[in-house]
Amino acid sequence: MAKRVAVIGSGVSGLTSIKCCLDEGLQPTCFERSDDIGGLWRFKEKVEEGRASIYQSVFTNSSKEMSCFSDFPMPEHFPNFLHNTRFLEYLKLYAKRFDLLNYIKFKTTVISVRKCQDFSTTGQWIVVTESDGKQESTVFDAVMVCMGHHIESFIPVQSFPGIEKFKGQYFHSREYKSPEGFQGKTVVVIGMGNSASDIAVELCQTAKRVFISTRGGSWVMSRVYDDGYPWDTVFHTRFSNLIRSILPWPLLKRVYEKKMNQWFNHENYGLVNLGLGTSEPVFNDDLPSRILCGSVVVKPIVKEFTETAAIFEDGTMEDNVDVVIFATGYSFSFPFLEQSVIKVENNEVSLYKQVFPPTLEKPTLAVIGLIQPLGPIMPNAELQARWATRVFKGLTALPSESTMMTDIVKRKEKRIEWFGTSRSQTLQTDHIEYLDELAEGSDARPRILPLLLKDPILALTIYFGPCSPFQFRLTGPGKWDGARNAILTQKARIIKPTRTRVVRNSSNNSLISYLLKIFGLLALFAAIFVSLQ
Ligand code: FAD
Ligand code: NAP
């Protein structure tokens, strides 16, 4: 009989987990506490308990070719960066295409997951759910925890003395929905992550004054990268990854800094990143321009609040503050699990490859999507789920507990070296390396050298082009016949929604630039030839 798997949550991670279970012939049952799929990407006017909450204007900061599932490209007319409603539309198309809805029990909250008595032999779990006030217990062979990590607001009140006396309004960015109601107000946004930057930029168009108060600053990047391509399609290529992996860290850091400062000098904007490493950048095309126009003012961190004012670390003060928004990130926990299974300490967990608790007698519980990759989460969550379902099935084995622990320690050291020690970086991973590592477990890692002989065009596109999710469907048990074509046509899909007006002479221009390149190459060869005479 097929193994039964409980999937907790039906966001990005839950949906792909259901699909991976089905692909491996497992029997999934997904429990979703709300009444629909999409998780974080389903915007609601009101914050819902136990589910991530976003503001109305959220757009993705990872692009469509990089943020799709590996066997389901986004429709070519979709823009490169998607409004949350568009991304939800994509998730709905995915659920429909693979018939996932039949496996989801909505309005059903998982309240407890406990090992069965004979766990050490069966690896089974008792999952208790609650729906309409009624509780039910079911035994499952495996569990996939897909509840996201943007549910619990983190407001570090102890770091902000006086906030309890503040007579204005204060709340977490999770509560922020739209600029309505902020007309004429003076607002201080605390933090310098993507939420803080988006909110400050949006509010400065209606509020009277907007301050963004940061302790560490941040690198700010544009979604528009070299030649106007989406940033991640240029940044995340296997070729650039190789360069990054061979450069010594101090040199690489300099290269990053130079690149980040090419757009604008972060120091002059009070934004320089004081973190140790390359903590997650902020993607905001408007922030520098708003600062330049004086509509957003960058301040150091607030040292103290009075009834009406914010006093900053440099001694300056802003009086008559109406609203303080703490865009200070999130905490996470697993309320339905015992600490002996997963313990969260200082916003950190010890999971093998960020998926499996290393101390379980049987590898039958996996956490999917508990990561913050330096790229889109979707292909990472999908590969985690592909690997986990193969482990559940016994097709792939985990190493010994001590090997897993050593790996966890090493990964943590590397993370701190790269991303620093801030609590907002505890789930940070690199992108391509992590994808490749997971793909090893599901036998899906593309092999460039053999491919170079067999299909050189494809091999070169994989190596120099965007490291898009389709690369992980070319070979192995989850092979998808459409993968090759999806890779070779991704550039056309990127351009399609922007080239909405055909520009006359564009073909002539590209012909001229092509001829110029050939001429340049010939001139170079001639120069070398002459110098060798
Ligand atoms: P979620 O989307 O949070 O879904 C979890 C689901 O689990 C929810 O439906 C919830 O109701 C359900 N659930 C929780 N607890 C229970 C329970 N006990 N019982 C039953 N159901 C439960 N990532 C990117 O890659 N690109 C982006 O552009 C991007 N933009 C972001 C923008 C914002 C504002 C934020 C906050 C995050 C963004 N992220 C982005 C990261 C984001 O976390 C992922 O895109 C993605 O939503 C994670 O999906 P998930 O399924 O893991 O979690
Ligand atoms: P976040 O990335 O965790 O950022 C939290 C911010 O709060 C950081 O600047 C942090 O500063 C600061 N902070 C935390 N504790 C502090 C303290 N005690 N004192 C002063 N400052 C403190 O949270 P987020 O911005 O809400 O983002 C959460 C996730 O959602 C991220 O992965 C982000 O990319 C994603 N997101 C994406 C979009 C988008 O796609 N458009 C929009 C919003 C969010 P330090 O760095 O100094 O700790």
Image (cartoon, rainbow, N blue to C red):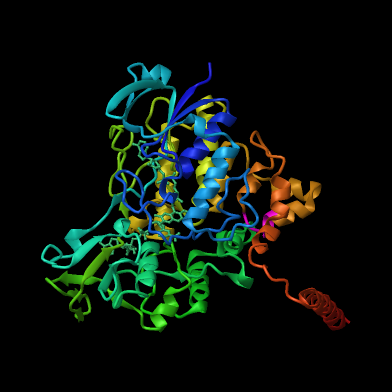
Taking the magenta stretch, the answer to whether it contains residue 183 is: no
Work out whether residue 144 or residue 430 is closer to the camera in this orientation and state it. Answer: 144
Lateral position of residue 241 relative to residue 483, left or right: left
- In the image, taking residue 446 as reference, residue 507 lies left or right, namely right
Query: In which quarter of the view is residue 11 placed?
Result: top left
- The C terminus lies in which quarter of the figure? bottom right
Residue 449 coordinates in the image, percent (x, y): 73, 49
Of the pair 318 and 300, the residue shown nearer to us = 318
Q: Residue furthest right?
A: 533
Asked whether 166 or 381 is in front, the reply is 166
What range is drawn magenta here? 462-467
User: Does residue 220 lie above or below 463 as drawn?
Assistant: below
Image quarter of residue 514: bottom right
Q: Name the side, left or right, on which 123 lies relative to 313.
A: right
Residue 492 in the image: x percent, y percent?
70, 60
* Foreground of the two, 470 or 442: 470
Indicate whether residue 464 is drawn in magenta: yes
Tell me the residue at 12%/72% (across/down): 306
Residue drawn at 38 percent across, 68 percent down: 197
At 36% from the left edge and 16% from the top edge, which residue is drawn?
Answer: 118
Q: Residue at x 33, y 21 (%)?
A: 137
**x, y percentage for residue 122?**
42, 18
Q: Is residue 495 left or right of residue 111?
A: right
- Up-down: is 265 above or below 89? below
Q: Is residue 124 visible?
A: no
| Residue 296 coordinates in the image, percent (x, y) | 35, 77
In the figure, 317 relative to 218: above or below? below
